[in-house]
Image: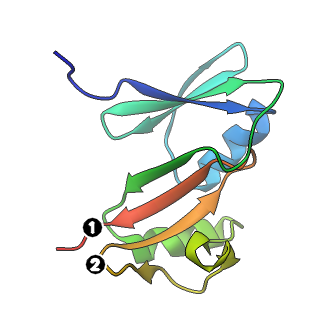
Amino acid sequence: MIKGLDHLVLFCLDTEKSKEWYEKAGFQYSHGYEGMHWFHLGSGLIMLHPADTVTPGDTAVHAAVEDVHQHFRQVKENGLVPIDHHLGSQPIGEPVTRPWGDIEFELDDVDGHRWAFTQRAL
């Protein structure tokens, strides 16, 4: 029986640079080993794994947040630029309400992995 997500592996060209980005994006660091870094994601983990090549745009992950507006402010204060891929990855000034009711914004990490930070519709 599958119990849930253990960890998601994201391949990165420079895991140290990626580690800094994930910290700025608000992820809590768990541990590291020989160039690999793990961050908490709910009951699971994200693993940053060294790679020689990465294809930007092949990964999209949605992370649930309690307060999307607060998280939006936090990532901007940390120097990151929230985007909306529905607008051609243009920078946005506030989280977007999707037609299905979720409120979210997106960030692309240093390797092009897309993250959406989503507050679910009530």
| Rendered position, 105 above or below 113 | below
Q: What element carries label 2?
A: loop
| Rendered position, 56 above or below 68 | above
- Which amino acid type corresponds to the residue marked 2 in the rendered image? Gly
**Occupied quadrant, residue 70:** bottom left
**Occupied quadrant, residue 12:** top right
Q: Where is residue 72 in the image (x, y as percent from the top left)?
A: 51, 72
- Which amino acid type corresponds to the residue marked 1 in the rendered image? Arg
Q: Which mark is residue 101?
A: 2
Residue occupied by mark 1? 120
Q: Where is residue 118 in the image (x, y as percent from the top left)?
A: 38, 64
Q: Do the residues labelled 1 and 2 touch (CB within 8 Å)?
A: yes
The C terminus lies in quadrant: bottom left
Name which residue lies at 40% across and 71% down.
Answer: 68
What's the distance in space between the residues labelled 1 and 2, CA to CA? 7 Å
| Rendered position, 108 above or below 86 | above
User: Between 88 and 26, which is closer to the camera in this rendering?
Assistant: 88
Q: Position of residue 119 (x, y in %)?
A: 32, 68
Among the two numbered marks 1 and 2 on one chain, the one whose residue lies closer to the N terminus: 2
Q: What element carries label 1?
A: loop
The N terminus lies in quadrant: top left
